[in-house]
Amino acid sequence: MSDTVLSVHDLSAGYAGAEVIRNISITVGTGEVVALFGPNGAGKTTTLRVISGIIRPTRGTVSFAGADLAKQSPTLRARAGIAHVPEGRGIFYGLTVAEHFRLGYRGEHIDPAVVYEYFPALEPLQDRRAGLLSGGEQQMLAVGRALGRRPKLLLMDELSLGLAPLLVERLLPVVRTYAQESGCAVLLVEQHVQLATEIADRCYVLSHGDIVLHETGERLLRDPSLLVASYVGQHAPDSGKAIAGSGA
């Protein structure tokens, strides 16, 4: 695998003293797309929130480009190159498309040219308020704002939420292309497992806060029964073994 951008090691975290994830380890390399699957309540969103600094872990470490993030606030992590597209898109319905690109953390620049390169459909909508966009256009805007920051690590939570599968089929390959062309590491949580597996280099499955499967996207496409077994709690042969060179 290429140089490691994100390294999550033996991470545990939760809410009000109750752990949601336990001792999980995940890596994402330069230009790599890694998918994180699992049933509702498995801890996927919690994992992304710990990485971006919204939630503090109870144990374990999160390292970004070799640096421990333990003392870094969410703002500092964003400035360092971590972009988080949350579930629910996180856009402002009263602002226009163009105005979204003028909003950023202190000293941060969002490049509209990058956004329009990957989502050209947004360019003629620059003066339209986000609340008047279609669901697909709103999701393009949310992802575009993240790409415009030229991130080193992109965290995406349920890109497909509320979208028709046809739109998801158009959006996910854009994420794959951006990772390849920019070298950005991508960790995505996605409910459309088949579509996400098609663009993912590697996949992890979380169940009840534990990693129960870690495989290449290629192998999971060849043998979908591995994913099915992980979701229903059956043992999948060799699924617990780390992929050679993955660092997991």
Image (spheres, grey):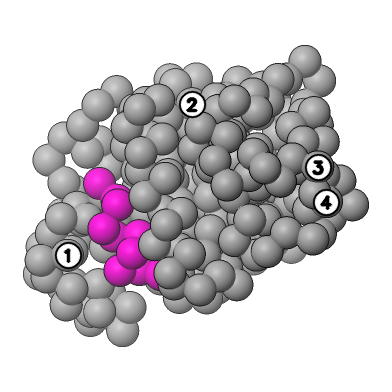
Total residue callouts: 4
- Marks 3/4: CA distance? 7 Å
Per the rendered image, the range of residues in magenta is 192-201
Give residue 220's position: percent from left, percent from top: 18, 64
Q: Amino acid at mark 1?
A: Leu
Counting residues from the N terminus, which is met first, the one under dot 2 or under dot 3?
A: 3
- Marks 1/4: CA distance? 40 Å
Q: Which residue is mark 3?
A: 127
Quadrant in the picture for residue 192: bottom left
**Residue 196 magenta-drawn?**
yes
Q: Which residue is mark 2?
A: 152
Farthest residue to the right: give it: 94
Quadrant in the picture for residue 231: bottom left
As helix, strand or loop, the secondary structure at mark 3 comes to: loop
* Quadrant of the rendering where the N terminus is positioned: top left
- Marks 2/3: CA distance? 29 Å
**Residue 143 appears in the rendering:** no
Taking 127 as reference, is 124 left or right? left
Question: Disc number at residue 129?
Answer: 4
Label 4 Cα neighbours within 10 Å, binned few <14 / some 14-19 / many ≥20: some
Give residue 244's position: percent from left, percent from top: 12, 40
As helix, strand or loop, the secondary structure at mark 2 comes to: loop
Q: Amino acid at mark 2?
A: Lys
Taking 77 as reference, is 127 left or right? right
Q: Which residue is mark 1?
A: 221
Whether residue 173 is situated above or below residue 192 in the rendered picture: above
Counting residues from the N terminus, which is met first, the one under dot 1 or under dot 4?
A: 4
Taking 158 as reference, is 168 left or right? left
